[in-house]
Image (cartoon, grey):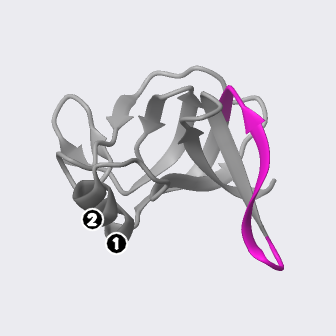
Amino acid sequence: MKRVRVYFNIHKKCLSIQHKNSKGWRVWRHVSSIGLSDVVFKVSEAGRQRVIREKRKNVHAYIEGTMKAGLSEMSGDIVTYNPYRLPTFVIKDSDTPIYTASEVYVVSRRITASPH
């Protein structure tokens, strides 16, 4: 399957999926949910600092992984990200930073992760 980046698109109120081509990462499609495997949670610190400084949202955090067909709602840790609170994605219940996961299922803004 294809390696992609996923982020919540605040204008379209859906998930934007990017794939890499010869010009770099480009939006490929929009979906309401997606399953990913071999996941890395990434945050651009420069982008995060710009959000804090300008108090204006911009795309600087995303989930990168391999699209997985057939992965649906699953049990696991709820993951969240708030650039004003912490510099990384975190497990919601404990604020423990999370950098990778074996599988992730994203529906709108809800991220469920199965840790390695």
Q: Which residues are magenta?
A: 21-34
Residue 32 location, x and y as percent? 68, 26
Which residue is disc 2 drawn over? 49
The image quadrant that residue 30 belongs to is top right
Is residue 34 shown left or right of residue 92? right
Q: Label 2 amino acid? A: Gln
Determine whether 67 is above or below 13 in the image.
below
Which residue is disc 1 drawn over? 46
- Residue at image coords 75%, 62%: 26
- Residue at image coords 54%, 35%: 10
Farthest residue to the bottom: give it: 22
Q: In what element is the residue under mark 1? A: helix
Residue 68 location, x and y as percent? 73, 41
Marks 2/1: CA distance? Answer: 5 Å
Q: Residues within 10 Å of mark 1 (few under 14, many from 20)?
A: few
Residue 86 location, x and y as percent? 19, 51
Task: Tell me if residue 33 is in the magenta stretch.
Answer: yes
Q: In what element is the residue under mark 2? A: helix
Q: Residues within 10 Å of mark 2 (few under 14, many from 20)?
A: some
Q: Label 1 amino acid? A: Ala
Is residue 76 shown left or right of residue 96? right
Mark 2 touches mark 1? (CB < 8 Å)? yes
Is residue 62 shown left or right of residue 6? left
